[in-house]
Image: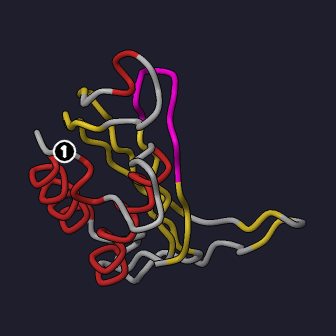
Amino acid sequence: MPFLTTTGVLPVACEVGLSRSVRAFHIMPGLPGPEGQLHDHDYRIEIVVDREQLDDRGMVCDLDVLEAALTGLTSWVEGRNLEEIRPAGFEAVTVEVFARWVHDSLSPAVAAAGGEALAVRVWETPVAFGGYRARC
């Protein structure tokens, strides 16, 4: 049975998600104290995949494929200096920049698994995150 795709002005979508923790290093140039020096954070990366209609299996996407992609990404990031992923033109890898990188890195796997859009939140502390959301 198909789900309705709109209710008023808010689109309706089905979603699934995962999260993983990873420790990585970064620096915020020009800031005093620990933030201005190379330091680590225990980040939590949270991803949510959505699509307007469930597939023939009744799924948004295959969670096993999604989990393998996220595990591969966090395994690669673990213990690294995030300067390795800093895009040209940016002074530092903020949580927003990190979230965009995660999105761009996972989008091909998400799309192949059936997802239509991917939202990423990177939590730097238990109460503070930056995020990025776009179609795959």
Compared to 75, does 52 lie above or below?
below
Quarter occupied by residue 4: bottom right
Most common SS among magenta residues: strand
**Residue at 40% across, 30% down:** 124
Seen from the viewer's position, the closer of residues 32 and 93 is 32
Quarter occupied by residue 125: top left
Q: Position of residue 62 (x, y in %)?
A: 27, 69
Q: Residue furthest top?
A: 33
**Residue at 53% across, 76% down:** 135
Q: Mark 1 sits on what residue? A: 81
Q: Residue furthest front?
A: 30
Compared to 22, does 119 lie above or below?
below
Please rate how many residues cluster around mark 1, counting C-alpha atoms within 10 Å: few if below 14, some from 14 to 19, many from 20.
Answer: some
The quadrant in which the C terminus is found is bottom left
Quarter occupied by residue 86: bottom left
Q: Position of residue 132 (x, y in %)?
A: 53, 57
**Residue at 30% across, 69% down:** 105
Secondary structure at numbered mark 1:
loop
Seen from the viewer's position, the closer of residues 83 and 99 is 83
Left or right? Give the position of 108 relative to 67: right
Q: Residue furthest right?
A: 8
Left or right? Give the position of 11 relative to 95: right
Q: Position of residue 54 (x, y in %)?
A: 48, 75
Compared to 38, does 45 lie above or below?
below
Compared to 8, does 108 lie above or below?
below
Q: Is residue 75 magenta?
A: no
Q: Amino acid at mark 1?
A: Asn
**Residue at 42% across, 56% down:** 16
> Which contiguous range is marked in magenta?
123-131
